[in-house]
Amino acid sequence: MAKSQQTWNKKEREKKKQKDRQDKAEKMQERKSGSGKLEDMMAYVDENGNIVDAPPDPTRKREFKLEDVVIGVPKQEAIDPADLIRTGVVTFFNEAKGYGFIRDLKTQESVFVHVNGLMDAVRENSRVVFETEMGQKGLNAIKVKLDN
């Protein structure tokens, strides 16, 4: 009895190649038959930005003026200097360490104040007028004066 010239691995590889060829031929035949039409693959975006399979309703179409479309960040309006000036009450001030906090009377937020930002000497419960600037950890009060 003669031994087969092909080993088991060769037979398996040959079977795999034959199956791949058959799959490729089936896919090609499916593409040629036109079962994947373009209309089946279409997707639309509705007025809320959701992807849907039905085309949008033309009666719900809205017109926009080209001038109303803003691309990018709009320019900031000039800040009125009167808006920068605030009034408040000193809730805490440590003279030894040189810092404290002012409660803004309008917004009720607490603003940090350093001794370098004082123009007049202040104490706790003093009414003050001040301006703010953004510091490393939040708002800082500057140009702090006693309110008359």
Image: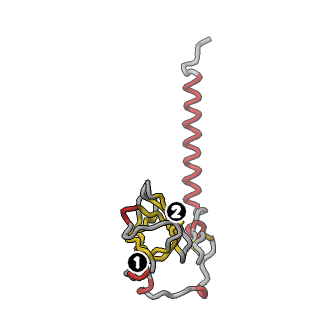
Q: Which residue has dot 1 on it?
A: 74
The CA span between labels 2 and 1 is 39 Å
Please state the horizontal and vertical placement of residue 31, each as a whole percent of the image. 55, 58
Which of the 4 quarters of the picture holds residue 8? top right
The disc at residue 54 is none
Q: Secondary structure at mark 1?
A: loop
Q: Which residue has dot 2 on it?
A: 92
Find out whether the residues at labels 2 and 1 contact each other: C-beta distance under 8 Å.
no
Please state the horizontal and vertical placement of residue 26, each as a whole percent of the image. 59, 50
Please state the horizontal and vertical placement of residue 49, each as a whole percent of the image. 57, 72
- Mark 2 crowd level (few <14, some 14–19, many ≥20, 10 Å Cα): some
| Residue at x 51% of width, y 88% of height | 63
| Residue at x 55% of width, y 43% of height | 21
Three-letter amino acid code of the residue under disc 2: Phe
- Mark 1 crowd level (few <14, some 14–19, many ≥20, 10 Å Cα): few
| Residue at x 56% of width, y 72% of height | 108
Nearer-the-camera pick, 3 or 29: 29
Nearer-the-camera pick, 40 or 105: 105
